[in-house]
Amino acid sequence: MVISYKAAQRKEPKFKEQAIQVKDFMTTKLITFQPDESMHTVIETLVKKGISGAPVVDDEGKLIGVVSEGDCLKQVVRGKYLNTPELIGSVVNYMTPEPTCVGPEENIMEVAKKFLELRIRRFPVLDNGKLVGQISQRDVMAAIQNLEQERWK
């Protein structure tokens, strides 16, 4: 009797891999601040627009920092400590200079890991040094929610 043996064959994966990039979920219509704007203006804008932070750009539109709710809270606490009811100070004094940035082609899962490692709520997105958007933890959550039940790449 002749037994035919067929070598193990590679099966096609059940799931197709999905490469999800930052550019597919980042915000491109950004609210930005200038370094000389008052912290009062920043707080007012963040509350009115319902956002937790924004990029700080110079006159040429170059990214120089990020200002967040946390930065604003520092200003509020400082004002209380100094017994100054007016919110004094400029963005440049409270922003985070030289923020960690990501690129538009980066994988969103890698960005999610960076959020967890660095404990940051948003990353400016730079393409060849130019500010093209911002991605937040909420944007990543929206991306994950929209994924099909398939493997992530």
Image (tube, rainbow, N blue to C red):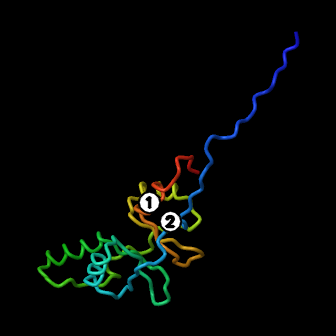
Q: Out of 19 and 113, give the one closest to the viewer.
A: 19
Q: Which mark is residue 21?
A: none
State the CA–CA distance, disc 1 to disc 2: 8 Å
SS for dot 2: loop
x, y percentage for residue 109?
51, 54
Q: Relative to 116, say whether 48 is above or below.
A: below
Q: Out of 150 and 27, give the one closest to the viewer.
A: 150
Which residue appears at 65% of the width and 41% of the height? 13
Task: Answer left or right for 135 relative to 10.
Answer: left
Q: Relative to 147, say whether 51 is above or below.
A: below
x, y percentage for residue 69?
29, 71
Quarter-of-image position of residue 48: bottom left
Q: Which mark is residue 25?
A: 2
* View extreme (right): residue: 2
Which residue appears at 52% of the width and 58% of the height? 108
Quarter-of-image position of residue 145: bottom left
* View extreme (left): residue: 83
Q: Which residue is mark 1?
A: 142
Amino acid at the residue labelled 2? Phe
